[in-house]
Image (cartoon, grey):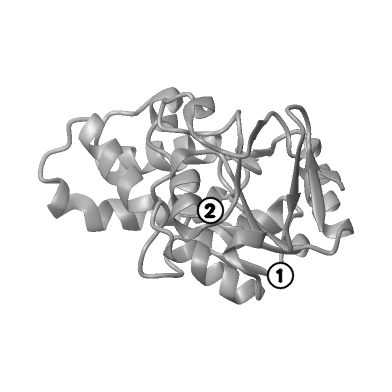
């Protein structure tokens, strides 16, 4: 099935689509900031600014928490990590989606994929227990045939394993399965798995310009995808 992208004109022949969550479909920076700062308060540690957190997002919750603890000068991070994770998980589940918003064009893009009959998966490094309620809260869960989180497989993006396993679940060949993401993690995983990749320009890419990362296209909105 042909999926058209805007100029420079690109047409992708795909059977399925994998879509990242944080920074691609939902701006979750507010959720991260709220849950992390509640966690830090519980640990009697100083707060952290949302713009600092933004550069730490994308490599899974353990990396995020350890990066935050390091940034605020916590000592014995290995020792306090289990308590930090417990407090973060509790707070995140309590506020999941309350400080987050869909990016413009997300529903239009997903509806385009669905109207084409493409099989669809949400593939994120976010823990599955966080991802599924967020998708439901934002009215996105009905679009996806399957949802996989950062704890669904032994390895996370940028390793290609999650993409290859998701292709198996979708019953599609990697070369005909599009990865839609917002970071170099998504691109690196897609290149290694043999999947085409399209990157969104508004998400989280560890403070680096996403347009410098190789992809089939760099889009400003999921709504820019059109039927072929």
Residue at horizontal 43 percent and vertical 56 percent from the top: 90
Residue at horizontal 81 percent and vertical 52 percent from the top: 2
Viewer-nearest residue: 37 or 111: 111
Q: Is residue 210 above or below residue 225?
A: above
119 sits left or right of 199 in the view: right
121 sits left or right of 118 in the view: left
Return the x and y of residue 202 as percentages of the image width and height: 60, 29
Q: Quadrant of residue 24?
A: top right
Residue at horizontal 69 percent and vertical 28 percent from the top: 220
Residue 145: image tag? 1
Q: Quadrant of residue 14?
A: bottom right
- Tell me, yes or no, whether the two marked residues, 2 and 1, touch with CB atoms within 8 Å: no
Return the x and y of residue 137 as percentages of the image width and height: 70, 54
Where does the N terminus fall, quadrant-wise? bottom right
Return the x and y of residue 149 as percentages of the image width and height: 50, 62
Task: Say which element carries label 2.
Answer: helix
Return the x and y of residue 141 as percentages of the image width and height: 72, 61
Task: Say which element carries label 1.
Answer: loop
Residue 59: image tag? none
75 sits left or right of 189 in the view: left
Chain-order first, disc 2 or disc 1: 2
Residue where numbered disc 2 is placed: 94
Q: Is residue 170 above or below residue 128?
A: below
> Quick one: label 1, few (<14), some, or many (20+) residues within 10 Å?
few
Residue at horizontal 26 percent and vertical 44 percent from the top: 66
């Amino acid at each position: 099935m042909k999926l058209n992208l805007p100029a420079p004109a690109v047409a992708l022949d795909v059977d399925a689509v994998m879509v990242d969550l944080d920074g691609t479909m939902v701006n979750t920076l507010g959720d991260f900031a709220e849950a992390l700062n509640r966690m830090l308060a519980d640990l009697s540690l100083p707060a952290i600014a949302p713009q600092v957190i933004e550069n730490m997002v994308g490599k899974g919750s353990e990396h995020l928490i350890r990066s935050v603890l390091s940034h605020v000068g916590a000592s014995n991070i290995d020792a306090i990590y289990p308590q930090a994770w417990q407090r973060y998980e509790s707070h995140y589940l309590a506020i999941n989606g309350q400080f987050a918003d869909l990016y413009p064009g997300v529903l239009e893009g997903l509806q385009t994929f669905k109207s084409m009959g493409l099989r669809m998966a949400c593939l994120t490094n976010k823990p599955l227990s966080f991802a599924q309620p967020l998708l439901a809260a934002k009215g996105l869960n009905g679009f996806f045939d399957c949802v996989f989180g950062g704890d669904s497989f032994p390895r996370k993006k940028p390793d290609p394993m999650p993409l290859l396993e998701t292709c198996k679940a979708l019953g599609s060949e990697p070369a005909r399965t599009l990865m839609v993401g917002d970071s170099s993690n998504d691109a690196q995983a897609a290149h290694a798995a043999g999947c085409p990749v399209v990157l969104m320009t508004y998400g989280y890419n560890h403070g680096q310009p996403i347009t410098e990362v190789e992809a089939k296209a760099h889009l400003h909105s999921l709504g820019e995808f059109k039927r072929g």
